[in-house]
Amino acid sequence: MKKFMDWMTNKFALKMNKLARNPWIASVQEAILTAMPMIFIGSFTTILTAFGGLIDGFPDFSPLSTFSLGLLSLYLAYLVPYLLMEKKRHNKTKKEAGLAGIGFFLMLVGPTFDEAGNILFQSSTLGNGGMIAALMAGLFVGFVMNAFSTHSFFKEDSAIPDFITVWFDTLIPILIILFVGWLFIFQLHINIFDCIYTLFSPILSAGDSFLGFVVLYFFGYTFLYTFGISTWVIYPIESALILQGIAANQAAVAAGNAASVINADGVSYYFTLGGGGCTLALGLMMLFMAKSKKCKVIGKASLVPNLCNINEPLVFGAPIAFNPILMVPMWIVGLLAPALTWLALYFDILPKITTLFSFWYLPGPICSYAVGGMIGLLFTFFIFVLSWIIYYPFFKVYDRQCMQKEEEDEKKKDQLAKRKAMRERTEEA
């Protein structure tokens, strides 16, 4: 174990940190971190709204979520190119890049126009559901703006004010960006969400097979999530399959036959304790075992949402997304947990799901017991223990890194304080 931890600390972590410092990756990660207040507000409001439906006269807090987490993709479309230009040291044009990101993203989501000339957007595409479009828009805009950043219509010693030179220097790249959106969306009528559905359709058609099941839940609930793309992106696609599955099982039971469909609505309760990637174990480690202040704070802030299977605060706050040290264990859990679940269902260790239980925001053990009884509850506990074992060594490495950074920051603060005190004494003398 000691050799493994040494390898994790001295080799694996160093390589992963180098990868994470890449400006393209770092800009996406920082964009998501910048939007964390909106994610926290939306997550807590979602919990309030969900439980509020059970209480008569409870106020509707859903607009708080709609205008915070519900606009996450819009925020990212601005922040990604803005931060990328900042990291590439093109500060003069970073604001223009952000504005171009918003415009290009709103084109990508495929707005419609009514007879009165109003632009209509589906609200889901502006929130979690549009994250693929937002990241694509942000990175594409950043690429174009970065490519043109070395070209200018004016000489460096020009007497023209900087803000005017920026106006003209960004005209061509922004025009190219919007032209690409116009061509693909309004002339060729390419729908990015149809493309996503086409991409996943082969997996959906094989969704009840071992490979189809594992690939669907690994990519949808884990892999894409670690790149900042929420699990809600594929839910409209996934729901078509799992609702058919539970309907088939209920029809079979009603006819006196045994349920046979594995991938039915509610199956994810077995392997998503805390949300996609089974992150409850990691959140509890951060809360109770972390030595760094950062991990402890994230553990506290994400506890309640994590217990209710909402893990955006943890995935984007720790972060797991775009953080190679925590991405790897999430991938391992994301592969093993669905694979073991499929095998348990196939060999009838777990019962096929016949009960429609849509209260996904209740703590995981309640959900797994509702669809699988006591054996379902025990299996979920087994997956939780497995996820704990997998996350633990990676958590220790990350916590140690955070602690070291905090110590370095404290030393820098002390040095600055000493210099300031010396200057003050010199001035007094």
Image (cartoon, rainbow, N blue to C red):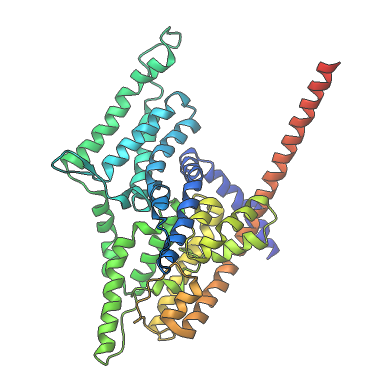
Could you tell me residue 12's position as x and y percent?
59, 53
Residue 329 in the image: above or below residue 255: above
Q: Nearer the viewer, residue 115 or 357?
A: 115
- Quarter of the picture containing the C terminus is top right
Total numbered badges shown on the rendered structure = 0
Q: Residue furthest top?
A: 159
Regarding residue 4, the answer to whether it shows in the image is: no
Horizontal side of 419 relative to 243 (left or right) equals right
Q: Nearer the viewer, residue 277 or 79?
A: 79
Could you tell me residue 108's position as x and y percent?
27, 43
Horizontal side of 348 relative to 423 (left or right) equals left
Q: Find residue 420 and report its image quarter.
A: top right
Residue 399 in the image: above or below residue 74: below
- Residue drawn at (32%, 52%) of the image: 124
Residue 287 in the image: above or below residue 187: below
Regarding residue 188, the answer to whether it shows in the image is: yes
Q: Residue furthest right?
A: 429
Q: Nearer the viewer, residue 64 or 34?
A: 64
- Residue drawn at (45%, 75%) of the image: 367
Could you tell me residue 78's position as x and y percent?
40, 37
- Residue drawn at (38%, 15%) of the image: 164
Q: Residue furthest bottom?
A: 256
Horizontal side of 22 relative to 239 (left or right) equals right
- Residue drawn at (27%, 67%) of the image: 240
Could you tell me residue 332's position as x and y percent?
50, 64
Q: Residue furthest front?
A: 57
- Quarter of the picture containing the N terminus is bottom right
Residue 180 in the image: above or below residue 93: below
